[in-house]
Image (cartoon, grey):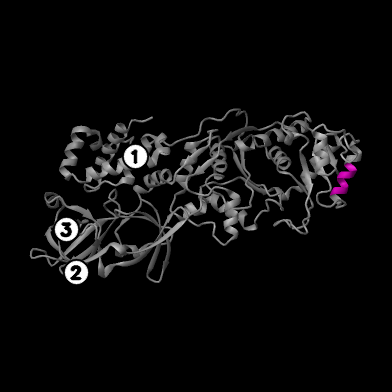
């Protein structure tokens, strides 16, 4: 457990560094990002340390620039030195066990809904390992249940779109529903060898049999000659049995303590006239179960390593029966715990229910990859989170603050900083003053890490400036960012001086501002859990050049992603501070 004094000292160190790099004003989000980068195990405590960071940042921002510099020189002189190794090393997954040949991994999603943060874990880990070992990554759609987990035709493309957004490519793509003839071929081999049999009993009769409450009923055919079972199997394929009237079972250990492992179902009949498959329609009626189809495909495609949630542990045991009967080499299976995003719905079935009510898969309130993407989360952020959690068997919970901290760090060096003032806090003021030049030109870098990329804004005496009313307190000294220093007097901004050094004498606060005649209307959508709020405001003229999907930072406000640009109005979604 980290001492709060240690966290406070770290916060002070990074707040000073951030303030020194940004004209004397530190930002809470940037400080948080630095702390979590140094102490990643604090991610689960993000909500507890935010108040400490807020308090420290407030203290640092109340100091003059010279006072900040003096403390850095006295306590943290290393912050003034440029280091080549400042960038954190890229996180990597641990080495794989049992690598004796070319590594082949696969991701096998059921296309019954969109990908979310949790189920993207298997995709990212599988792809990363294939890349680490110069192996192959396969995309396999597990779509052999057109009734209970019915695939959505559009979900095939949703999944591919999400994977491409994550930077994942694949050597081969196929749907399990395209390989029925191969599944039937393996099933016949197993029947002929006496490893599988047709069960025409009702469910209760079979349960009584495996619970040893009575002997084998005549409808079970477990002890029947393989040729007899082969005949019954072919009747299934010809459509001579209705749905639920016959299944093909694999012979396993009837003494297994887990009843679900005893003679599990390999194939069942589905009435595809009433429940058609989105790709094959009613062409097939005898469908393989997940464990059988997966076993055949993993063998045929040479899969060497399988990464799956620990809830699939029992499935691995079932699949091993197929591999052993067929004399195939079983892949190395590595399991991990559940991954939850705090405050977001992670249940695939519940997300599907919401989608059926008309909500789009990219709704920013959802934990879907499309929703996170629309909210301004970068694919690199998602990959880093998954790789950092890795293959932990214990369940992991991530807060949105964790995601924001990583995302902020990645955006900080490249995102453009623009000025914006919310309408409900906007105060229009005339800039004037006896000693004010007729016109002043502000040269404002889009990102202070790249001073050569800038815009210029000319302000003349008498122009109307929009500022935040929280900043415009009577008698306050402000520095209109990169423009000049002013004193608030009534509804006027009285010019005081031009340079930042002159402003430091008056302990000016650096604030964002918008020239009214150049202002551009902005609608900002903000989300908190399931709640959506709409905020209107004024952006500087540069906002007008933004395009859909641009992610920028509104100075002293937060990062936003451009969602729409329509007829002189910009609609953006608030990402995080």
- Identify the mark nearer the N-term, 2 or 1: 1
Instruction: Tell me: residue 132, above or below residue 484.
Output: above
Q: Residue at x 78, y 59 (%)?
A: 273
Image location of residue 412, percent across then percent down: 34, 48
Kindly identify which residue carries mark 2: 463
Q: Are marks 2 and 1 in contact (CB under 8 Å)?
A: no
Q: Residue furthest bottom?
A: 567
Q: Main secondary structure of the magenta part?
A: helix
Q: Are marks 1 and 3 in contact (CB under 8 Å)?
A: no
- Identify the mark nearer the N-term, 1 or 3: 1
Residue 445 lies in quadrant = bottom left
The local crowd at label 3, few if under 14, some if 14 to 19, many if 20 or more residues have their Cα within 10 Å, is many
- The residue lying toward the viewer, choosing from 395 and 442, is 395
Kindly identify which residue carries mark 3: 484
Residue range (magenta): 230-236
SS for callout 2: loop
Q: Residue at x 31, y 40 (%)?
A: 52
- Identify the mark nearer the N-term, 3 or 2: 2
Distance between the alpha carbons at the discs numbered 1 and 3: 31 Å
The local crowd at label 2, few if under 14, some if 14 to 19, many if 20 or more residues have their Cα within 10 Å, is some
Magenta-drawn stretch contains 231: yes
Image location of residue 396, percent across then percent down: 50, 38
SS for callout 1: helix
Image location of residue 438, percent across then percent down: 13, 67
- The residue lying toward the viewer, choosing from 501 and 216, is 216
Instruction: Tell me: residue 428, above or below residue 361.
Output: below
Q: Are marks 3 and 2 in contact (CB under 8 Å)?
A: no
Marking on residue 34:
1
Does residue 87 appear anywhere in the picture?
no
SS for callout 3: strand
- The residue lying toward the viewer, choosing from 530 and 309, is 530
Marking on residue 108:
none
């Amino acid at each position: 457990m980290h001492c709060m004094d240690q966290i406070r000292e770290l916060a002070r160190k990074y707040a000073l560094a951030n303030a020194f790099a940004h004209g004397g004003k530190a930002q809470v989000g940037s400080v948080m990002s630095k702390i979590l980068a140094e102490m990643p195990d604090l991610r689960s405590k993000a909500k507890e340390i935010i108040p400490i960071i807020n308090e420290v940042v407030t203290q640092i921002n109340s100091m003059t620039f010279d006072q900040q510099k003096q403390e850095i020189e006295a306590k943290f002189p290393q912050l003034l030195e440029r280091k080549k190794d400042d960038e954190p090393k890229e996180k990597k997954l641990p080495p794989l066990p049992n690598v004796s040949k070319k590594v082949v991994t696969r991701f096998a999603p059921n296309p019954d809904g969109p990908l979310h943060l949790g189920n993207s874990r298997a995709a990212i880990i599988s792809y990363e390992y294939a890349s680490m070992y110069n192996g192959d990554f396969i995309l396999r759609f597990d779509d052999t249940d057109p009734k209970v987990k019915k695939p959505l035709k559009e979900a095939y493309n949703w999944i591919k779109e999400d994977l491409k957004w994550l930077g994942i490519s694949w050597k081969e793509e196929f749907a399990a529903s395209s390989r029925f003839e191969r599944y039937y071929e393996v099933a016949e081999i197993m029947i002929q060898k006496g490893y599988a049999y047709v069960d025409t009993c009702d469910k209760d009769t079979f349960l009584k049999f495996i619970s040893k409450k009575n002997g084998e009923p005549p409808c079970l055919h477990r002890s029947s000659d393989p040729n007899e079972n082969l005949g019954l199997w072919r009747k299934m394929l010809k459509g001579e049995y209705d749905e639920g009237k016959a299944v093909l079972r694999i012979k396993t250990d009837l003494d297994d303590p887990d009843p679900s492992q005893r003679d599990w179902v390999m194939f069942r009949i589905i009435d595809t006239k009433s429940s058609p498959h989105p790709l094959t329609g009613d062409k097939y009626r005898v469908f393989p179960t997940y464990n059988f189809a997966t076993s055949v495909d993993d063998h045929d495609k040479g899969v060497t390593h399988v990464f799956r949630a620990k809830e699939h542990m029992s499935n691995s045991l079932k699949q091993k029966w197929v591999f052993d009967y067929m004399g195939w080499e079983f892949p190395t299976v590595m399991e991990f715990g559940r991954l939850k995003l705090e405050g977001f719905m992670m249940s695939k079935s519940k997300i599907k229910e919401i989608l059926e009510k008309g909500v789009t898969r990219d709704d920013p309130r959802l934990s879907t990859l499309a929703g996170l993407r629309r909210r301004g989360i970068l694919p690199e952020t998602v990959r880093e989170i998954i790789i950092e959690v890795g293959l932990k068997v214990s369940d992991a919970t991530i807060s949105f603050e964790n995601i924001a901290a990583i995302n902020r760090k990645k955006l900080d060096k490249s995102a453009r900083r623009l000025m914006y003032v919310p309408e409900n806090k906007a105060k229009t003021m005339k800039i004037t003053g006896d000693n004010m030049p007729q016109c002043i030109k502000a040269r404002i870098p889009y990102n202070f890490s790249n001073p050569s990329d800038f815009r210029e804004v000319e302000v003349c005496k008498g122009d109307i400036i929009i500022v935040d009313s929280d900043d415009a307190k009577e008698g306050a000294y402000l520095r209109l960012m990169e423009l000049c220093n002013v004193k608030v007097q009534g509804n006027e901004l009285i010019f005081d001086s031009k340079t930042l050094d002159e402003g430091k004498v008056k302990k000016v606060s650096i604030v964002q501002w918008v020239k009214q005649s150049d202002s551009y209307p902005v609608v900002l959508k903000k989300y908190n859990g399931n709640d959506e709020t709409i905020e209107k405001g004024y952006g500087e003229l540069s906002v007008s050049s933004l395009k859909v999907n641009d992610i920028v930072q509104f100075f002293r406000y937060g990062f936003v992603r451009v969602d729409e640009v329509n007829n002189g109005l910009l609609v953006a979604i608030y990402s995080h501070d």
